[in-house]
Each structure stands twice: as C-alpha cells, then as structure tokens.
Image (cartoon, grey):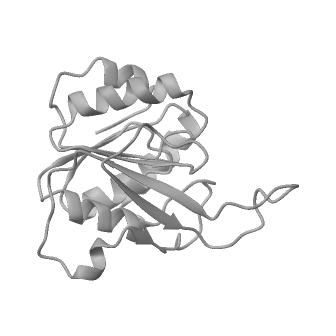
C-alpha cells in the first residue's frame, strides 16, 4: 500500500506494533526535536526496529548500531566545502537477524552504487536496500517507509516478498514511485 500523504501525520495516527520494520531515508534537514519524536513513533509502531539513513553532520539520536554507505565520488556539494561521500545507516532495536547469509553481508560498511537512470537526487542503491531487508526481515513481514521518495524500498520489498507501506507527500514524486513499484522496476 502506498499513499500520497504526509508520513509524519500518518505515523502519529497508527496503532502500536502495526508494522514489522521501519526502513527510511527521511529529509536530512529535520529539526532534532522532530527526529526524536519520529524515532519515538518508529519504536512504538514497529515490532522489530527501525533503520534510518542520516548525514554524519546531523545524526539522529544514538542508535544501537551504525552502518556507513560510502557513496561514489561526484561533484555535488563541493562549492567552498569538502564533499561528503558517506551516509550513516542508523539501526534501532532491530531484533530480526538472519544469520544464515554469507559473512560478507554483515559488514557495516556498504559501497553499493545506484544502478541505472534516476530522476531522484537522493535515491539509494537497490543492492544496499536488498541487503538490509534480507538481514532484518523475513518473507511476509511488512516494511514501512514514511518518506518513500523514488520508491526503492518498495520495489525491493515487493521483489523479496515483503509487505510494503510507503508514503510520499509530493504528488509528482509519488506518481513516479507508484509507477516504479507497481512495475517492479529497479
């Protein structure tokens, strides 16, 4: 299920333990008080934890584990300052751990690349999202992404047999994500 709606408002209205995992890449300019409130709601509505992407300069409240996505080098954001090619992956209370995978799937440093054409500036690699979903969910579990953006998490969740709830407030971005998720495009 995907909705063209404000994810923050939607989360506040949900009952406790209504999803299995929150996996999301929220806007990086959220005030700390908003991050804290969202994290409280993520913990409340998720049965098995949350995984949140964040900037190293603006991390969310202290997670149980840190991961790092080393991004490919680009010329974005290099005007009069150093470029950042790392994003944090903050893991909160994830109690599902699929230990039957190869050891290399459990490093906390990811160097995946966004593959193919994209029109969303902050898209995450499907291979990275796939690894996180396989490590922290089982088939049939439901993943929530309240900041769906281009729909990468939804695409991967559908392919892997997980339920998916996604929210995106921008109608134009929502329409592109909907086409992508329904079409199973990577």
Return the x and y of residue 145 as percentages of the image width and height: 36, 42
Q: Compare residues 150 and 92 and report the one nearer the observer.
A: 92
- At x 18%, y 56%, the residue is 137
Return the x and y of residue 40 as percentages of the image width and height: 31, 27
Return the x and y of residue 72 as percentages of the image width and height: 62, 73
71 versus 49 height, above or below: below
Q: Residue furthest right?
A: 80
Return the x and y of residue 67 as percentages of the image width and height: 40, 61
Indicate the quadrant where residue 11 lies. top left
- At x 26%, y 57%, the residue is 158
17 versus 154 height, above or below: above
Residue 3 located left or right of residue 72: left
Instruction: Name the quarter where the N terminus is drawn.
Output: top left
Residue 48 located left or right of residue 72: left
- Evaluate whether residue 59 shows in this view: yes
81 versus 147 height, above or below: below
Residue 37 located left or right of residue 115: left
Residue 70 located left or right of residue 127: right
Instruction: Name the quarter where the C terminus is drawn.
Output: bottom left
């Amino acid at each position: 299920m995907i909705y063209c709606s404000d994810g923050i408002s939607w989360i506040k209205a949900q009952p406790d333990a209504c999803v299995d995992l929150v996996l999301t890449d929220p806007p990086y300019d959220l005030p700390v008080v908003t991050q804290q409130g969202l994290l409280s709601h993520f913990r409340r509505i998720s049965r098995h934890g949350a995984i949140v992407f964040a900037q190293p300069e603006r991390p969310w409240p202290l997670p149980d584990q840190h991961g790092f996505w080393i991004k490919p080098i680009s010329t974005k954001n290099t005007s009069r300052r150093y470029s950042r090619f790392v994003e944090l992956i903050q893991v909160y209370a994830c109690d599902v751990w699929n230990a039957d995978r190869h050891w290399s799937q459990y490093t906390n440093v990811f160097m995946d690349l966004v593959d193919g054409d994209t029109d969303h500036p902050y898209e995450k690699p499907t291979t990275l999202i796939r690894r996180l979903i396989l490590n922290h969910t089982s088939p049939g579990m439901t993943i929530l992404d309240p900041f769906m953006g281009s729909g990468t998490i939804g695409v991967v969740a559908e392919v892997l047999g997980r339920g998916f709830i996604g929210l995106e407030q921008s109608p134009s971005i929502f329409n592109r994500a909907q086409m992508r998720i329904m079409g199973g495009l990577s």
